[in-house]
Structures are given as C-alpha cells and as structure tokens.
C-alpha cells in the first residue's frame, strides 16, 4: 500500500508542504490560488458581514411560515393562519402542531426530527453568534415548536407516529393549509411495522434539543433526554428499515447511520460510556460518503466523532479518516473529488433538489474546519487528499463560497433565498405562499389548480425560504411554480443553512470575513440590499 503523504508541520516537511498546500482550486470557470501559509496570515485583516445576519434572521423566520396547528400571538409570518387542528382526532390522539415538510401540507416525522437535530446543533455550537444577532430565542422557539410535536408523536416506548397526511392525495390538491380537506391519514411505526431510521432520528433530535434547553428549561430538557434514550432502545431493539411513506421519504442509506447519529448525540449530551462503547464497537458501519442529508447522516456522525478523536479518544480513528474523506470528496482540486461544480462554482450532485445537498455539505465543511482549527495537533489541522493538502481556512473558504452563491454571488446575481436581496424566486412551489392569505381572501379555496398555474408572483412572500433545487448545471434558473424539483423549499434545507450562517458569523466575530472572500468575490462583490417586503406580506 502506498504511504499517504502527511500534512505535518515538521521542519523537514516544510518544502513538501508548501508544494502540497499551495493550492490551486478550480471551481467551474474560476481558478483560485491560495498559499497555505498566507491564508492564516490574512485572517488578521477582516471585516463584518451584515448580510449573513440578515440571512440568518430570515432563514429562521421561514419556519414560522411552515407551522401547523394553532398559531401563537407572537407569529411573525402574518399571512399564515391556524390549520390542521384535528390531526389525530379520529384516532383519539393529539397530533396537532409541528411543521409542514415542504410546499405541501404533510407532516413527516423523519425529516422533521432531522431538522430539529440540525437546528439544535447550530444552537449548541454557535450560541454566542446567535445571541449577538438576536436570533437565539427565535431559534429556540423554532426547535420547541417541533419537539413539542415529536413528544406527542411518541405514542409509547415502542411506537411512534411517523406521518400525518396522505402524501398522494395531498399532492393532487393545491390548497392552502388553512382550507385543507384532504385525508389526514396517520402512519405509525411499532414492533410489527418497524422504522429504525425514524426512531433513531427522533432519539437524536431529542438529545440535541435537550442540550439546547438544559439551562433555560431543565425539566423540559430532562424529559427530552429520557425520551431520547427510550427511542434509542426502541430503534435498536426493533430493527427494520423504514418504507412507510414511500415514494416520498424512502430509506436509501439504511439505518446504521441513524443509529450512530443517535448514539453520538446522546453521548454528547450525557457522556455515558454505554453510548461511546456503541459508537466504538460499530464504527465499521462508518464509511466515506459524498453527501449529508435527511437520509444519510454518516458525515454528521463522522464530524462529531472526529472531534472526540482529536480530543484524545484514539479508538475513534475510523470516524476521523472518514471525515477527512468527506472533505476530499467535496473540495475542487482534490484528487478524490466526487462532486462537480457548475461554471459559477456551485456544488452540483444532481438535477433535482440540488441545493439541499449544498447546504448540508457547507454546514459539515464549516463545522469540521472549525474542529480542525481548534485542534492542538498541528498535523491534524490539515486534510490530505492525494497530493493536495487543505487547511481549515481553505475548507472554510470553499464552504463560504457555497453560501455566498445561494445568497446571490452567482452568474445570475440571483438570491435563492426568498425575500433576500433585490432578485429572488417569485413563484416558490408552496401552497400557502402561492394562494392569497385567508385574511385577504376568507372564502375557502378548494383543490382548483388556478393558483398553481398562475403566472403571477406568489401573493405571500415566504421570507427566508430557500428553494431546494435552484439553478441547473449551467447556472441557469427558470422561475416556474410547477417545477417543484427546483422551486420547492424544505425545512431541512433551511436548517442546514441556518447552521452554516451561524458558523460564518463566528468567523466575522473572529475577524475572519474579508480574508475568506474568494478572489472573484473580492473583485466583483456587490452589496446585497434588504428586501422591501415586510414580515406580514
């Protein structure tokens, strides 16, 4: 086996390292040269980025437009009204609340729980940044809205409601949630019909959220911790892959990633050795991946456990190796890069719903680069990808370029976040946003497709919604409501984006913003203006 070249800092390696780490990154038609020694030096001359704060605020506000159930007096997305107040009633269970998954009116427990885990991760890692941006309480409210629902969904120690709403019937009907009259069918997992992925993800969500609330609401946090452990035991005792809501959320990666993900979050919360032993004994499940998504959590587990490895737990080396491999799979110029970029520089893994994978990748790259930068081991601070060596600053710079692209630094100069900047999608594939608000049009709107095929902009600006697909492989974008693969938002796409924005605000706090602009951004960047739309649009 060929020996892998190191990224160490010893004197004998200085010349080799300069050759390896003097980076030439090709992102589409953009060539970026970064000398590794200069990147850290540039960190001392950096400014601020108020547009990240604005995007963070709007990215969190988005969740209020996705709320199901009885809305609170503090509701800021004023175009929304109460909806689905009888969910579960026919089965004598209260399943009101939670979030609509995307542009439809169905509630899926699995991606909702994943959303909670990501939002909680952001709150844990970036409490200072969120607080300084006056968004911490809003983020906690967004998490709480979902955890309250997930606690209702856990019917017992061995059963969990996994879905509310008939996906097929719902997708055949274009009506706002306030008028919804499609079947609110409920689906459950239990010992007879297992769904290990769903149960384990809920366990992870409860554990991560417990960490968020442990100081502000200790009794609630304790309840979440207890329920997390129960769900984990249910998941490992009744193993069976989840296929309950196919064809909308099928499991493609299996359930091993969710089991490790749950164990990692419970260990992070409790420090109990049982979960560490589980992670150590089953780390062979971990393997290199090239995505982080609602279905595939391996990169998240690897990022969490690599931090433990760098803190001194040498028994977790597989996770560190696989976390490095994720970086290599993402970074342009890497000998093992697996994801192409558009000519404008956006990671492009698939035609449908591509941006959801971009926000997930950016979040992992930013979190992992922070972990590497904080490591006391000089050699561990870099990632070797064949003959290329990537420093934390270089990884961060690339992740930042993905966020900037979504916010408007792209060939079309278009923001893919609704309500951000001067130009953004006007025909979001979203039922509630595309039909006049119940307050403006109190009469019932049935399943007519008149609004679906309307060529007019959406009457309600769903501020903060990120389109899940975005541009095509050539950076082109058609703003067409019926094109759900490019125009539909999802709660988990926004959740990963919130984490990325909070991380970038952390760099601003440390004075590391201007230096992380890619050269083409430094030359051509334009200030993104606030949208004139109010929250009550």
Image (cartoon, rainbow, N blue to C red):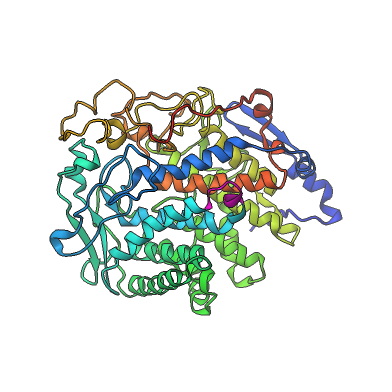
Dominant secondary structure, magenta: helix
Tally of numbered tags: 0
- Seen at 79% across and 47% down, the residue is 16
Q: Is residue 194 left or right of residue 138?
A: left
Above or below — where is 137 with respect to 150?
above
Above or below — where is 111 with respect to 182?
below
- Residue most extreme to the front: 73
Q: Position of residue 344 (x, y in %)?
A: 55, 27
- Seen at 47% across and 56% down, the residue is 140
Q: Is residue 395 left or right of residue 270?
A: right
Q: Position of residue 39 (x, y in %)?
A: 75, 42
Which image quarter is the N terminus in? bottom right
- Residue most extreme to the right: 11
- Residue 380 found in image quarter: bottom right
Name the foreground residue: 315 vs 224. Answer: 224
* Residue 132 is covered by the magenta coloring: yes
- Residue 23 found in image quarter: top right
Q: Position of residue 187 (x, y in %)?
A: 21, 59
Above or below — where is 202 with respect to 249?
below
Residue 505 at least partly seen: yes
Which image quarter is the C terminus in? top left
Name the foreground residue: 292 vs 484. Answer: 484
Q: Position of residue 35 (x, y in %)?
A: 76, 39
Name the foreground residue: 190 vs 44. Answer: 44
Residue 387 at least partly seen: no
Identify the magenta region: 129-136
* Residue 425 is covered by the magenta coloring: no
- Seen at 56% across and 44% down, the residue is 501
């Amino acid at each position: 086996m060929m020996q892998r070249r190191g990224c160490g800092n010893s004197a004998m390696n200085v010349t080799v390292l300069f050759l390896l780490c003097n980076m030439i990154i090709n992102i589409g038609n953009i060539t970026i040269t970064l000398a590794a020694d200069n990147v850290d030096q540039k960190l001392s001359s950096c400014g601020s980025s108020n547009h990240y704060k604005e995007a963070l605020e709007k990215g969190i506000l988005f969740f209020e437009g996705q709320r199901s159930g009885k809305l609170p007096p503090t509701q800021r997305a004023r175009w929304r009204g109460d909806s689905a107040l009888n969910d579960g009633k026919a089965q004598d269970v209260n399943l009101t609340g939670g979030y609509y998954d995307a542009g439809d009116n169905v509630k899926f427990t699995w991606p909702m729980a994943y959303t909670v885990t990501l939002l909680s991760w952001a709150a844990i890692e970036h409490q200072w940044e969120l607080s300084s941006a006056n968004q911490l309480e809003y983020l906690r409210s967004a998490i709480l809205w979902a955890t309250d629902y997930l606690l209702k969904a856990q019917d017992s120690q061995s059963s969990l409601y996994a879905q509310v709403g008939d996906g097929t019937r719902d997708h055949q009907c274009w009506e706002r949630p306030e008028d919804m009259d499609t079947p609110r069918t409920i689906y459950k997992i239990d010992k007879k019909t297992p769904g290990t992925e769903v149960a384990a993800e809920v366990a992870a969500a409860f554990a991560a959220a417990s960490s968020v609330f442990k100081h502000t609401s200790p009794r609630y946090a304790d309840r979440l911790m207890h329920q997390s452990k129960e769900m984990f035991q249910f998941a490992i005792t009744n193993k069976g892959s989840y296929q309950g809501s196919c064809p909308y959320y099928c499991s493609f990666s299996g359930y091993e990633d969710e089991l490790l993900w749950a164990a990692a979050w419970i260990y992070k919360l409790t420090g109990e050795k049982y979960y560490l032993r589980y992670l150590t004994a089953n780390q062979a499940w971990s393997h290199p991946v090239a995505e982080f998504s609602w279905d595939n959590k391996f990169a998240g587990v690897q990022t969490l456990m690599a931090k433990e490895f760098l803190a001194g737990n040498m028994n977790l080396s597989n996770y560190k190796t696989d976390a490095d491999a994720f970086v290599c799979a993402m970074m342009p110029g890497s000998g093992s890069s697996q994801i192409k970029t558009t000519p404008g520089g956006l990671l492009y893994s698939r035609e449908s719903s591509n941006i959801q994978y971009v926000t997930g990748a950016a979040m992992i790259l930013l979190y992992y680069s922070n972990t590497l930068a904080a490591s006391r081991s000089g050699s561990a601070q870099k990632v070797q990808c064949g003959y290329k060596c990537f420093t934390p600053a270089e990884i961060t710079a690339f992740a930042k370029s993905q966020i900037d692209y979504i916010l408007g630094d792209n060939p079309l100069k278009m923001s893919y976040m609704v309500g951000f900047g001067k130009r953004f999608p006007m025909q979001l594939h979203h039922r509630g946003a595309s039909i006049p608000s119940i307050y403006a049009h109190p009469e019932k709107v049935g399943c007519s497709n008149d609004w679906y095929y309307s060529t007019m902009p959406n009457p309600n600006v769903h501020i903060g919604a990120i389109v899940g697909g975005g541009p095509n492989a050539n950076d082109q974008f058609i703003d067409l409501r019926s094109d759900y693969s490019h125009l539909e938002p999802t709660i988990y796409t926004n959740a990963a984006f919130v984490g990325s924005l909070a991380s970038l605000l952390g760099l601003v706090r440390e004075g590391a913003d201007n230096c992380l602009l890619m050269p083409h951004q430094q030359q051509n960047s334009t200030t993104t203006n606030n949208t004139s739309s109010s929250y009550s649009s």
